[in-house]
Image (cartoon, rainbow, N blue to C red):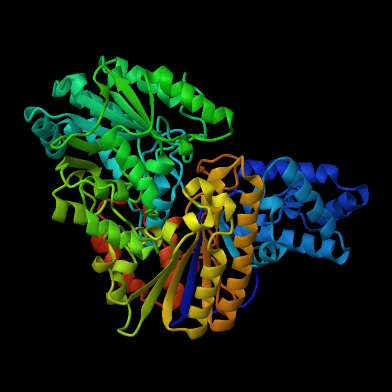
Amino acid sequence: MNGLTTQIERGRALVVVTDGLGFDPDKVRDLSRRVIGELTPRTRRALLDAALEVAPDSYLPLDLAKLAVMPITAEGVNPNLNWREAIDILDKVDVIRDRLREQRLLAEIGSLRRRIALEHRYIPWFAEEPAWSEIVNRSLTVPTNASGVWVGYEDVDPPVQGNSETGHQQIGNLALAPQIPLQISQSIGDGSFYENAQLVSTINEAVEGGNNVNFCFLLSGIRGSDGRVHSAWNHLEAFCDLVFVRLGVSPDRVKMQAILDGRDAPASGSMELEGVEGGYLGELERLLTRYDAVASLAWVIGRGLAMDRDYREENASTDYAQLTEGAGLHTWGFEGVREIVAAYHEDGRTDAVVEAISLIGERGVSRINPGDAFINLNFRSDRQRSKTASLCGAREYLEREARSRGREWGFGWLRDDLDLKMCTIAEYDAEFEERYGIKVAFPITPHRLNLLSNWDRLTDEDDFYLLVAESVKALHMGYFVRGRREAEQGSEREDRWVVPSDGVADGVFSDSDFYRRPVMKTREITQLVSEAMGVGEHRLIMCNLAATDMVGHLLPARFQAASESYRATVAALVELSGVARASGYSMVLTSDHGNIENDAPTHTVNPVLTTVLPAAGSVSPRDLDADYSANLYDISHTAARLIGLDANQIGEIVGVFRGGLSDEFVGWSIVD
């Protein structure tokens, strides 16, 4: 942390987003105690002696010893301290480690740490890369909030877990980017939800024309901690109230597709969910019973098929065939569904991979008919685009998006006669509304305080930036990081490289198969970014490394594969940091949310780490008396500072567009 502070003027920077890589503060403290307890007497004595030698008055030697046995010190430092206090502790822990290194004891501690981490299935310690830990410990590193109100969600307890969509929005933004579910929940609270013209007209037009009202909803989000990434349970409750009570639609005219999660929510949450009898299916049955509408459940399917965002035609066609033909397994009622899903769980498979189940009612299996209404209640856009485009017959859209990911579609399954009345709870793509007449209940407006959307006014004509990701995360290092903008709405000086993710030819039929190739495209992206830095044509490069998130979602079953994804990611960071320094690029490393650090398939509410590596010299924190913590919307300011953008000009933009945001929700550079 000590050293000459470099005065940074015009420069270049690389921002790396390691998707889904957080840390669990409680876990690291517990594991560090266990490590100290199992050290040999000689090593424990040496550790404590070194801690006693440097212990500050305000910190106990044992607490310093616990920090010294962690691979990354910043994960154990109290974020409620100020930077001055935190730096003092970090420097003293560096001294302790140097003492242990002189006595050749670090290898013993590292070996013990990995063994204990394996016993407790904590991947960041088990699969650690000592070279990367050393880089992080010697650099400016700070815990960073990545969930709840700090990423634009409602202030609920427990907090709403972080996710890739909002994480990338915050990383690209100069201030907090509020999220659409907060707007929807506020409308429910003030009653305007029930008068939403788009929802009400879509439902009424179908009913008045003698057609059915069909809708889909991902079963998640009862609380902040069990999903709420793509859907929120209070939105479903409000919709049922609107349809069955306020508009008086007969339940036999309403058909629901229930999508099972198992990825952002617990793996078997459809049947087993802490504090919820019978899991999501139990809660759904109780909700529909309230309106005498249990028979409205018409289709059940796993999200791997119904919410594929990488444009795999076989998944889109399976979902489409279920809705339009009643295809899939056939069964009766909730009990029949439970029997099928239970068999999946007994076989070790999660809710996400449950195949299409079509329920048999009094009139047989339900099918969407021409002229029906279809309403999508899932608010996050990336995983609803393929489904929406299929149902509205947007062949050109599907062909274009599939081809951009290296896929060719045949379209033999797509009908031309549906002519559905469609409404989506949020905007998935402006093209759906403009070209296909789809209504949007809660339009999404681009964030005005996005760094990339202001790039052209902040930089010179020859300043370009580059976005790099594999196709499964293309929207995140694109639409979302631009502040909810398509490419044509952004800067004219953007380059974007998308590497096709593994597909059917590689044995990856859905997101649940990424364990087969757990490194994903980490190496290819590392090579592309390294080459781009070597050429030096881009003033700012931003890239996403997806493996720790995508394979992390397959825990606990795929522990070894997830560990391999972690090792590949941190090895890539070591390589990128070396190339960046050699090429004159500063580097900012952060994550969009936590995931792989917990032995579960869901995202977490844990913090992430942000590390700043200047192109030369070292940097100081922004304010020694400020809290030792950061927010994701500080990243854009940090990148701007490192490449030498005009801070006053950025401040003017924030001043104009911040609205009523309080100071705590306005970003500022992590470095001075």
Q: Quadrant of residue 360?
A: top left
Q: Quadrant of the N terminus?
A: bottom right
- Residue 308 visible here: no
The one of 612 and 435 positioned closer to us in this rendering: 435
Q: Is 166 drawn above or below residue 353 in the view shown? A: below
Residue at screen point 42% across, 20% down = 336
- Residue 389 visible here: yes
Question: Seen in the image, is 601 located left or right of residue 668?
Answer: right
In this view, which residue lies farthest toward the left? 208
Task: Give residue 185's position: percent from left, percent from top.
Answer: 28, 35
Task: Give residue 497's position: percent from left, percent from top.
Answer: 41, 71
In this view, which residue lies farthest toward the front? 412
In this view, which residue lies farthest toward the right? 42
Task: Give residue 206's position: percent from left, percent from top.
Answer: 11, 32
Q: Is 209 drawn above or below residue 35 in the view shown? A: above
The one of 256 and 433 positioned closer to us in this rendering: 256
Question: Seen in the image, is 386 located left or right of residue 9?
Answer: left
Q: Quadrant of residue 365?
A: top left
Residue at screen point 13% across, 49% down = 437
Task: Give residue 551's position: percent from left, percent from top.
Answer: 55, 50
Question: Seen in the image, is 630 located left or right of residue 566?
Answer: left
Residue at screen point 36% across, 76% down = 646
Residue at screen point 49% across, 72% down = 14
Q: Is 661 drawn above or below residue 376 in the view shown? A: below
- Count the marks: how many? 0
The one of 129 and 503 positioned closer to us in this rendering: 503
Question: Seen in the image, is 192 located left or right of residue 124?
Answer: left
